[in-house]
Amino acid sequence: MKVRFDPEADILYILIKEGPLKDTVEIAEDLFIEIAEDGSIAGLEVWRASKNLLEHIK
């Protein structure tokens, strides 16, 4: 698993597994899951992470 934060885009990326993606689905406002070709979860994206997530863990 890899975690990366892009401060310019304010997006937190959590990569669970690498490989080709089948789809990206918004499951809640500013929260997306990336679906791998085999149907498993490949990653998560949290948009506006500083507001939606990071302020809650300070």
Image (cartoon, rainbow, N blue to C red):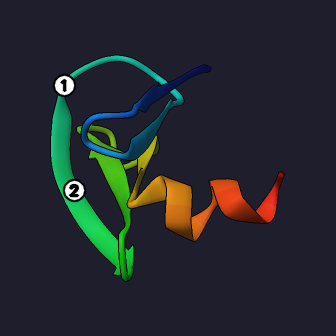
Would you identify the image quadrant in which residue 31 lies? bottom left
**Circle 2: is it few (<14), some (14-19), or many (20+) Cα within 10 Å?**
some
Does residue 33 sit above or below 34 in this rendering?
A: below
Q: Residue at x 39, y 61 (%)?
A: 48
- Looking at numbered disc 1 in the image, what kind of residue is underneath it? Pro
Q: Residue at x 49, y 55 (%)?
A: 49
Residue lying farthest right? 58
**SS of the residue under disc 1:** loop
Does residue 29 sit above or below 8 in this rendering?
A: below
Query: Would residue 44 be found to the left or right of residue 35 on screen?
Result: right
**Circle 1: is it few (<14), some (14-19), or many (20+) Cα within 10 Å?**
few
Residue 22 or 29: which is nearer the viewer?
29
Q: Residue at x 16, y 45 (%)?
A: 22
The picture places residue 11, in percent across and down from the top left corner, at: 37, 45
Query: Would residue 4 be found to the left or right of residue 26 on screen?
Result: right
Query: Would residue 51 be found to the left or right of residue 8 on screen?
Result: right
Q: Which residue is mark 1?
A: 20
Does residue 19 sit above or below 32 in this rendering?
A: above
The picture places residue 29, in percent across and down from the top left corner, at: 37, 82
Q: Residue at x 31, y 48 (%)?
A: 35
The picture places residue 55, in percent across and down from the top left corner, at: 69, 61
Q: Which residue is mark 2?
A: 24
- Tell me the distance, in whole angstroms, between the alpha carbons under discs 2 and 1: 12 Å
> Is there a contact, CB below 8 Å, between mark 2 and mark 1?
no
Mark 2 or 1, closer to the camera: 2
The picture places residue 54, in percent across and down from the top left corner, at: 66, 53
Does residue 2 sit above or below 38 in this rendering?
A: above
Which numbered circle lies on residue 8? none
Query: Would residue 52 be found to the left or right of residue 26 on screen?
Result: right
- Looking at numbered disc 2 in the image, what kind of residue is underneath it? Thr
